[in-house]
Amino acid sequence: MKRSPQDIQASSRLVTRRGLMLGGIQLGVIGGLGMRLRSMQLDHADEYRMLSDGNSIKIRLLPPARGLIHDRHGALIAGNEQNYRVTLTREEAGGDVAQVLRRLSRLIPLSEQRIDELMEEFSKRSAVTPIVLADRLSWEQFGSIAVNAPALPGVTPESGLSRVYPRAGDLAHVLGYVGPVSDYDLSKIEEPDPVLMLPEFQLGKVGVESKLEESLRGKAGARRVEVNSAGREMRELGRQEGQQGATVQLTIDAALQNYAAQRMGEESAAAVVMDVQTGELVAICSSPSFDPNKFVRGISSTDYKALMGHDHRPLADKTVQGVYPPGSTFKMVTLLAGLESGVINGGSRFYCPGHTEVGGRRFHCWRRGGHGMMDAVQSLEQSCDVYYYELSQRVGIDRIAAMARKLGVGVHHDLPMSAVAEGIAPDRAWKKARYDQDWQIGDSLNASIGQGYVLASPLQLAVMTARIASGKVIQPRLIRAIDGVPQVAPEFEDLDINPLNLRQARAGMDAVMNGSRGTASRSRILPDEWRMAGKTGTSQVRNITAAERARGVIRNDQLPWNRRDHALFVCYAPYEAPRYACSVVVEHGGGGSTAAAPIARDIMLFALAGGLPPLDAVPSGERAAMEERHNAMHLYTPTPPQPGRSRA
Amino acid sequence: MSYLDYQVAQVPVGWRKFLYLNWPLVILLAAVSSVGFLMLYSVAGGDADTWAKPQMYRFAVGMVAMIALAFVPIWFWRGISVFAYVGCLLLLVAVEMFGHVGMGAQRWIDLGPIKLQPSELMKIALVLLLAAYYDWLGTRRVSRPLWVLVPVLLILLPTFLVLTQPDLGTAILLVAGGGIVMFAAGVSLWYFGAVIMLVVALVGTVMESRGTDWQLLKDYQFRRIDTFLDPSSDPLGAGYNITQAQIALGSGGWSGRGYMQGTQSRLNFLPEKQTDFIFTVLAEEFGFVGAFSLLMLYLLILGFCLYSALTNRDRFASLMTIGIAGAFFLYFSVNMGMVMGLMPVVGVPLPLVSYGGTAMMILLMAFGMIQSAHVHRPR
């Protein structure tokens, strides 16, 4: 199509006309923008400058309430309490701060020394900065200050939330505690939530409080306030409430945990109770404990030194951080490794003369006279060491180590607790890598009875027992629900172990408790529906020299505490339909059957009975001691909340 | 086709095209972008790596793209206008189905390194197609109802798609940008009058619909209107932003608080200060002098574009130039109007100054087409 010159000209004229009109409109708009700019920046600049310099609008964060933590039955184990405090702002005190402080000292205890300290602080700080005079006031003190406010210019009673652990030491190692945010904490976080900068904000430091910090923290709210040039709030413009952190429900049964803590008393010990079907940790208790509330409130240096200097290490969580030679509780591992490899079957027998000689070294059975002929079940029942010396030479360490890992020893278990230890299931490669030495046959013998390089935490021993009892790859779990959403137990797979062989190990554990020569028969449970199977362990922490052996091994109660044997015990019940598995370690407690087994039995009975164990569930010889212990206990009974003091 | 009518032989060829670029326009674009770099350096607290450097890098790439596009003959752009429009339409449908949802709206297609925002491309493609349409239509039929209906539909189709994202700001810009081309092409003023009446009626109905079952806008859109009408009605939300933006802007005074001295922006009172609210930082730190200078730079860009359009005898070239310059005008005037409290808060960046990858690239490429029209104008 050819275009005529007239057409082009007509188009050009039209476009020019419209283009100019458009340009005019655009110029008009730009002129309007310019006028507006002029009006704002030239005519009204002073007003805006004043708003900018003086009456600024500031954001004040409202810290969110930390999420609550409940036990499996909904009992509160970590909550928040009102923390009442008073602050004073010098600018508002009308000049005579000392006078106000003196008046205040009649309402709340303020020593002369404290007043002097405060006066010095006031002289250093800006007149508009509120300074905390006292915190953790009682409701009565707080109320009396509020009532007397007119006589106390500048004094503001304030309330905030602070973490409180109603069960004190019972769950200290599980929950951990919160504390003020340190510079070190901030340095570890990439983009810290601004709420962490608030001076009174509390952050999870260890344990569940730390591992579930994200869920528990909640979301900060904000207030938009107008402040004057001195920084004082003039009015609140708007408010957005924060969102409380998620409520976390643990699998722990606080009543059982409390009983376990009381039962272990002052012993340096650990107990783990696990649900055999779901892997839920019903109790996981390390003794002695400490009061986490002291850490929240700021622990005094004397208290802290006392905790640090205590030889029973109250701050350490022995259940997951502590690793011990498992001693004879490891024999199920060696036995199963032997059965699974086909080296022996349940009927295979070894002769125990009381010792065995390998590579010029003599390895002793705990029973000097020897056990005679032993089969698999008998070897567990009487805990014959020679049986395992013989067995380990035929099975080899690598298969024993593989079995240990299969049962959960020497592997990491993922729990939201601090410093969960991995333990050691040693094999040739491990020793080569760790010590650059070849594996010796003597190492195998030691490992076969859970001595030498083998190390396991009480948690791992409980997992091991749960796996033997259930025949499934049970994984430990600590979180039951977050914000009401249940954390569903996974479908655990079957263990890759022949069920017939597992039955041999279980029969052996049953014989330990209920056989005529069982090492822990004194701690058996009588009612058939709670029948318990277990295994004792006593692990040496010192070498017994040949000379000492010749003189006669020194008995534990004649040794200093920290040279005595560790006492261990693992068990599960009921034998026919396992519900709970339990492990108990008593550091330097002496024999597993005397020190650990009774504790484990009592804790298991409490779990099975759902309350204080009935006395007729234990052999008659044990009842008097048990009753005496129960009378001496101060078990936790929840107190109903007092009106007015709970949560505002 | 119509270029055969002109003396194509006089159009510069090869590297000589370089000399025929609209150089004042190039310099003005660079000047405005430099203001952007300065401000981005300032809002990052004196750190170039945060925003200024990436922006400079994009500007460099965009400039090269602009000059490359300027070398492409203008008749090529007219030739592909239909395909560009259809392509953008397909992309808009694609974003509807697979797009990345951000800030409650589906706007992005994630192509690995680039986040493609088809609605940005559509603004340019629509201008191209409408210019080509009116070039083909000639002058005599422009105001006949049937021939008015066609471009209206061409505008409404992408607008509808953008509205469903939902992105009210871009939808308004699309309608206004298309309207500018129609206006320049000479569509009778009666139509524009009728549309304005219609819009007034529509706004009335929309406001009426609030709170009823047939509510026509999302709640947040109504809230924006509320905030616009009375910023103090929502001191915690958008009204807070606007209040703070105005305080920043007004407190700049005649000469401002000095570079990197703006208290409002320093103290984080300003929201999105590197994107939509960057003008307030400029106004606070350089005062009326700085803000007005930027406005004048924009005015000069518009002026050079308009001059180039009016002296170009080719209908497509001049309509396209007016259309793109009009879109540019809408961008900065809406953004400035917004931060000065003359318009509701719609997320429109300040062109060439705000931090933003694709927006700047696409804008510079659009200016490349204006340059192409300038280089290849009939002589």
Image: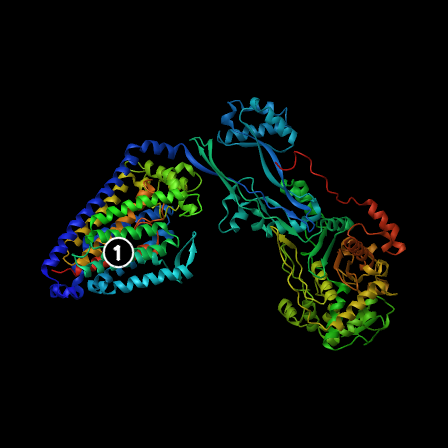
Residue closest to the eye, A334 or A39: A39
Q: Amino acid at mark 1?
A: Leu
Q: Horizontal and vertical percent for residue A468?
A: 73, 66
Residue, x 22% and y 63% (percent of image)? B78
- Disc 1: which chain? B
Q: At 25% from the left edge and 60% from the top edge, which residue is drawn?
A: B129
Residue lying at the far front in this picture: please name it. Answer: B145
> In the figure, is residue B320 to the left or right of B201?
left
The total of numbered circles placed on residues is 1
Which quadrant of the structure image shows residue A563?
Answer: bottom right
**Residue furthest out toward the right:** A620
> Would you call the spot at circle 1 few (<14 residues within 10 Å), some (14-19), or many (20 or more)?
few
Q: Is residue A206 visible?
A: no
Instruction: Tell me the residue at 11%/64% (across/down).
Output: B7
Tell me the quadrant of the picture where the C terminus of chain A can be found.
top right
Q: Position of residue A63 (x, y in %)?
A: 54, 41
Please state which of residues B233 and B367 is positioned toward the viewer in this rendering.
B233
B74 relative to A362, above or below: above
Quadrant in which the N terminus of chain A is drawn: bottom left
User: Residue B14 appears at what percent x and percent y?
Assistant: 17, 66
A278 to the left or right of A217: right
